[in-house]
Image (cartoon, rainbow, N blue to C red):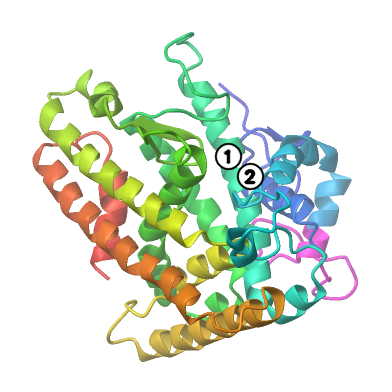
Amino acid sequence: MEDKRDCRICGNVSDGTHFGVDSCRACAAFFRRSVVMKKQYVCRQGGEKCFIKKNVRLMCRLCRYKKCLESGMLPDVVKNKLDEDLDEFDLGVKCEPSTSDAEIKRGPPSISGEVDGETNTPILNKVIENYRQLCSVRRAAEQAMWRHTYSNQMFAFTTIDTEIHPANFNLVSKIMRANVPATAEFINETFDAFGLLGQKDKWLVFQSFVPIFWLLENAWGTYKRFYNDREIIRFMLTQTTFSEVQIPEAFFSDLAAVQPLDLKEVSKLLVKCADRNIYLAKRINRANPSEKEFAAAIALLLWNPNLCDDCDEVQNLAANQRAKILAELHKYYKYEVCLEDYAGRLGEILCLFSTLQWHNAAVRDELEIGKLYQLYERDSFIYDIWRTSLSQ
């Protein structure tokens, strides 16, 4: 019989060794986040002797972090795993010097030294910082998941580079499911106003956000990865996976091997989704958004005006947050980019939302058709996440 080990930080059941210490997933995630994001905590009680146990509802973060260190967790292990990704990732905006009109519209390629930007756009700056971290964490997790999935299939396929891989239905579903906690953490850490909502309203906002956020990311990934190709024949599905437009049946091959499936018909659904993904990528290319504009798009998706018709508290909070985000965009255009007449520029960015909403509605319809073909008999997560958002 296998011995169960306890987490050396909170006493919960350990699920293995994390950063050198037996710990539960929650404490490991807390330690990773604290190190990577360079969190500065303050003791809740002031004496740095708070009780850290699994049954404590709101553990003191400073004392929890100190206990992680005292128990032997190694910050360097976290840094070695993620620093390379953090250094390379810049929301896909290339930092090449240029004086072209396009580059002027995009604004400064880096905001780390922009005093005005840090002062005047705190929401957008926080979105950028935390989104970089979200992508790095998910990319590392996806690569680990991919290696585990295909560890016994040497030379099973070829890739266009070492960072991204052809996808199949089950792998994408597993990745999306695994990404939900990281996305929830991103929202909690990034948007202070989210904490003002009750649990039911938080769930409502989160469910509405996740599917359309993923679609935006997929189109953004297609734009950054493949738009310079002579013809776009691949489209991104997650941080590290893509599908081939010309061989959509390959995406469902893992399902076809274990259940009856009309490959021809379900492949048509994927092709339609791919066409819209690529169309949205073209719209993104036309808008050519900067980091801060992309950050604003993420924030506006979270606080969209269609959250709940009969929830005045949520609607009022969302409207207040949208006003703050648009005010920061105004400051960005006026003081950082020095673009006095930015109405057309802002309109181009906002027009992406109508295309994105159209894409999202079509995905919902296609998922319902997929259900008729028994596409979700073994794994219904992708269907469930869109169905739940539709019910709000």
Left or right: 169 in relation to 144: left
Rendered-image quadrant of the C terminus: bottom left
Q: Residue at x 58, y 85 (%)?
A: 327
Of helix, strand and loop, which one carries label 2?
Answer: helix
In terms of image quadrants, where is residue 131?
A: bottom right
Q: Indicate the quadrant where residue 174 lies.
A: top left
Q: Position of residue 322 (x, y in %)?
A: 49, 82
> Which span is picked out in magenta?
41-64
Q: Main secondary structure of the magenta part?
A: loop
Q: Residue at x 40, y 64 (%)?
A: 209
Q: Residue at x 78, y 62 (%)?
A: 112
Q: Amino acid at mark 1?
A: Arg
Q: Is residue 314 left or right of residue 288?
A: left
Q: Is residue 68 left or right of residue 240?
A: right
Residue with the mark numbered 1: 139
Task: Quickly name the residue at label 2.
Answer: 136
**Vertical comparison of 367 with 76: above or below:** below
Residue 45 is a magenta residue? yes
Q: Is residue 328 magenta?
A: no
- Whether residues under marks 1 and 2 lie with C-beta atoms below 8 angstroms apart, the answer is yes
